[in-house]
Amino acid sequence: MDTCGCPSRVSQLACGTLCPPSRNIRPTSARRAATSSQHSLVRALAARSMAAPSSSATSPAFKAFVDASAGAMGALFAAVLLYPLDVAKTRRQVDVADQQDAARRKEARNLLAAVWLIYRREGADGLFAGLSSKVAHTVSSNFAYFYWYSFLKAAAERQARAPITTGTSLLVASAAGALNMSMTLPLEMINTRAQILPSDDEADADADKDKDQDGRRSMWGLAKEIYAEDGLLSFWKGFIPSLVLVSNPSINYTIFDKLKLQLQHSKMAATNATRVSSLTALEAFILAAIAKAVATIVTYPVIRAKVLMQAQKKQVAGQQKTSHAHHHAEMGNSMLQVLKRIGELEGPSGYFKGCSAQLFNTVLKSALLVMTKEQITKYTMRVLYMLRRDAAPKAIEAAKA
């Protein structure tokens, strides 16, 4: 408390304008009453400021947490809903033309036909092979990405005191993607192996104890198998193409943010609104689909090279070679070797083999993710605003008491 009775937190600002200067004169009773009323107002404003969660609710870290949570939930919803398409897409990507069974290639002529083929041969379990590892990877990956992207973007905008440029947005998205990829690549590696292994693919007799009830390798069993190949480094197989693919979400979310900003400005101009409105679910879906399609086409050759690198197994001493391990044994150990091998075996079209399946799956998944995320973020922030608004009158009443 200062000598005038105002809380020290506001004395230098509010009290400096509301309170009378100290003089060696006796104030009149009217002046004392006015001053007392002013002091009460200052104390009420100070209590409201201290009680309302304005600073924490609008801080970059808090906004990043809300965005990350919404992004993770949206990604999980999309991943589970479209998981059978994801399995079929991955299996198409790892098939090499001169090794693939011709009859099976004809049967799986498109993504939906491939889904039906997996169901006929392996049942529903085949369509959800590796779902547990996918859930773990999706939640952790998207939470990490959206957290770092939102946090770094807010920090950059605060530093620049203006909306960031396209170039800065790309750098921020790339940094967020690199941090996310480094932390979650082992889970992606496990999931890729789980998706491409049919239930009857056995590495050795000792692996039976690491199988689930449906005869598939568990996450723990796959992790041990991957570790046996090259130690811990095996979990980061495909690191270089994954690092290159950091540009995929960077391109994706940069395009989405720019399209979103343009649409919001157009809506404001059309309605003479003074506030920026949120996107509707349909608007978010369409913009996200466009952005993801562009990002996927630009980076697809590297996407396929990464999947092939993660799919091929290194022969472990004393382990019987499986047909699947042999199937990808000669693709190469580096991204450039794999890309060169694809060109030799399949020609230029091989670089985009499975691209339509990738587009259908990832564009739909990304659109569902962003649509869900936008709605979750909007309602979460609305609830926080209502809580903040309700807390303010209570704080003022408490200050008056």
Image: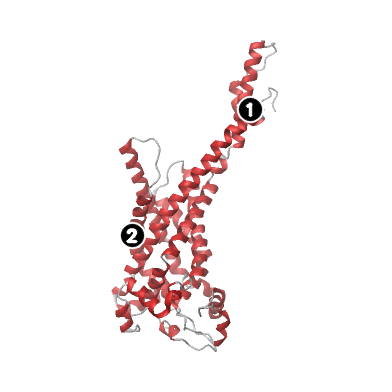
Would you place residue 69 above or below residue 105 in this image? above
The residue drawn where x is 48% and y is 63% is 138
Query: Is residue 145 visible in this depiction of the protein?
Result: no
Secondary element under disc 1, as helix, strand or loop, is helix
Q: Quadrant of the N terminus?
A: top right
**Identity of the amino acid at label 1?**
Arg
| Residue 5 or residue 133, whichever sits in front | 133
**Label 2, label 1: how many angstroms apart (C-alpha)?**
55 Å
Pointer 1 local density, CA inside 10 Å: few below 14, some 14–19, many at least 20: many
**In-image side of 77 versus 35 (left or right):** left
Residue occupied by mark 1: 43
Pointer 2 local density, CA inside 10 Å: few below 14, some 14–19, many at least 20: some
The residue drawn where x is 32% and y is 74% is 113
Secondary element under disc 2, as helix, strand or loop, is helix
Q: Residue 327: image x %, image y %?
A: 41, 83
Q: Which dot, 2 or 1, sits closer to the camera? A: 1
